[in-house]
Image (cartoon, coloured by chain):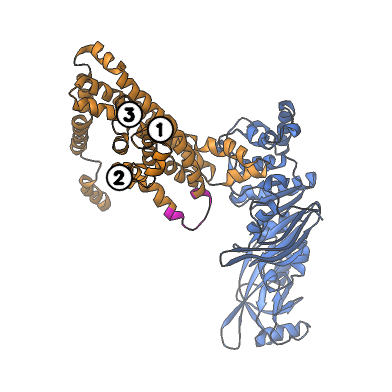
Amino acid sequence: MSIILNNISKQFGDFTALANINLDIPEGELVALLGPSGCGKTTLLRIIAGLEHADRGQVFLKGNEVTDQPVKKRQIGFVFQHYALFRHMTVFDNIAFGLRVKPKKERPNETEIKKKVHALLNLVQLDWLAGRFPEQLSGGQRQRIALARALAVEPSVLLLDEPFGALDASVRKDLRLWLRHLHHELNVTSIFVTHDQEEAMEVASQIVVLNKGHVEQQGSPSDIYDHPANAFVSRFIGHTNVFELGQQDTFWLKNSGLPTPETGKVAHVRPHNIELEKATDEGAQAILKDWQHLGALIRVELHNKDADGGAVTLFAEMPNEQFKALQIDKGDRVAVRIRHAHWFH
Amino acid sequence: MKITAAAQAHKPLSLSDPDGFKYLLITLTLAIIGLFLVLPLATVLTEAFAKGWLTYRDSLTNPDTLAAIRLTLLTALITVPLTTVFGVCAAWAIARFEFSGKNLLLTLIDLPFSVSPVIAGLIYVLVFGAQGWFGDWLSEHDIKIIFAVPGIILATLFVTFPFVARELIPLLQEIGHEEEEAALSLGAGPWKMFFKITLPNIKWGLLYGVLLCNARAMGEFGAVSVVSGHIRGLTNTLPLHVEVTYNEYDFVGSFAGASLLAGLAVVTLVIKTFLEWRQAQDLKAARVASE
């Protein structure tokens, strides 16, 4: 295990930021700490880095306890959301900083530093910017330089705090993929913080879902999507339809051959687990209210009058071709079949 | 069309429009500056040179004046570094840490700005004077503070305390601490972090504070006057020397000393303008960098 957190707790006044966090992060993984804002994910990252100290609990990096060690001894690389490049230094000096502040006997000489900095600049494909100052760079370039600077000290763990948070949508897409590839190349254990579930699914090899200072679930993206541990994770990752189990809902579930629900439970159904066909009988029907083209998928919005006369909205998603074959359009009545549901309290 | 007409009807009310009013205000400002600032400065110079260059030179090189200049320089030399170190420490504590009583500390730092300098001098007389709290103990050990150089330095320290701290607190808050954390994460110790990252970022603001502090240390009259005792050649700083010579109708001597202080003011003003310009540039860079 590369990073082990043992019972980490942290209070800020009356606010519990983290409550008894236990985490094992295996060597070489690219892990996303995912959660809504205020869930404690950044605090946890800063505790691993040593920029913040836990009230209780221990931090182990590569098998060594570092709980009481200052940042400089932990051998971590930290990338900040707003880059935190040294504004009075050139790109070259920024990246060289970590090498130049090493104690005399470990410090490489200037030729070695020059070689290493240019190698890193090539790695992030920005060698031509060596002489520029941070204020002359675009956001995406700054973030890549910040990453190169963090990698210069050959950290055993790379920590990234919302690395794409301050970037434009298009730049963000590119950088996500680039980070994933870079990680394949370097294979250094990395943790990044994000509140964007799509980003976590796209980039990470493992996701840790945090909520209100607790770990809700840890697992691979497909694990978390297909087998959410609880209602929070199911709702937070991807889209989901929540069945409060009115008459109609129960009928649908029964009709779909799914087990009868226990009282007090709700069913979560992913949009792609809902099958539609043109309605033939007068049984459980819904009205196709609207549909949207999402590229490869069509999202269908269904309305259904429940017993009290209120309208319930249901979302189904299916591939383009399948939707065309159904020959249904706005205003049509459709029958609903549910392929799979998750049950939560 | 209607809108255009309405806009035109409004135009004469716009503040920037009537040129006459603009120039009236500018002239008025210039007249006030001329009357109350430039004219006195010119008077200082004419009076100083009233009896020719040689007399001017003599009155600047007589032993009492030289002693006053030396004492002024010595006071600045001791107080400016001390208030600089104190200012950086205080600004760091306030900008980087959260603690209860922070506002109280801020108020205390500002205290010398709001207290009359005469009071500042007086409190030291009350504490260290012959009839003061420590008076007996000090005279037993033959330590002189009041009516001696240490008293002058203490009084100057009091009045110059806030300059550097006040300048740095907003600057440090604006810059934020992410760059410092980045330096730590890259393996720098606290000292390397301060000297390689923090100091370059605040250097213009720091110099600005030091400059103002120095101008005040050299020019302070009230607080120093109370604790000095006006002993010729021993405890007279330059501003005190100006007063003493003036009271003795040595106008050339007095204005010659005043011309030095005026010169200091002009130099301070020029450097201050430069530093303000540099600082504005740095802050602009800081904003661009954190966007």
In the image shown, does B200 or A315 lie closer to the viewer?
B200
Name the amino acid, label 1. Leu
- Residue B237 circle label: 3
Left or right: where B106 falls relative to B199? left
Q: Position of residue B56 (x, y in %)?
A: 25, 15
Left or right: where B94 falls relative to A35? left
Task: Specify start and end residues of the magenta stretch as a single range.
Answer: B94-104
In the rendered image of the structure, the colour used to display chain A is blue
Residue that carries the numbered disc 1 in the rendered image: B211
Q: Give the Cα distance between marks 3 and 1.
A: 19 Å
In the image shown, does A3 or A177 lie closer to the viewer?
A3
Name the amino acid, label 3. Thr
Q: Is residue B97 magenta?
A: yes
Instruction: Answer whether residue A5 is visible to the viewer in this image.
Output: yes
Residue displayed at 75% across by 34% down? A106
Residue A194, placed above or below residue B140: below
Residue A263, placed above or below residue A192: below
Q: Position of residue B30 (x, y in %)?
A: 21, 32
Name the amino acid, label 2. Ile
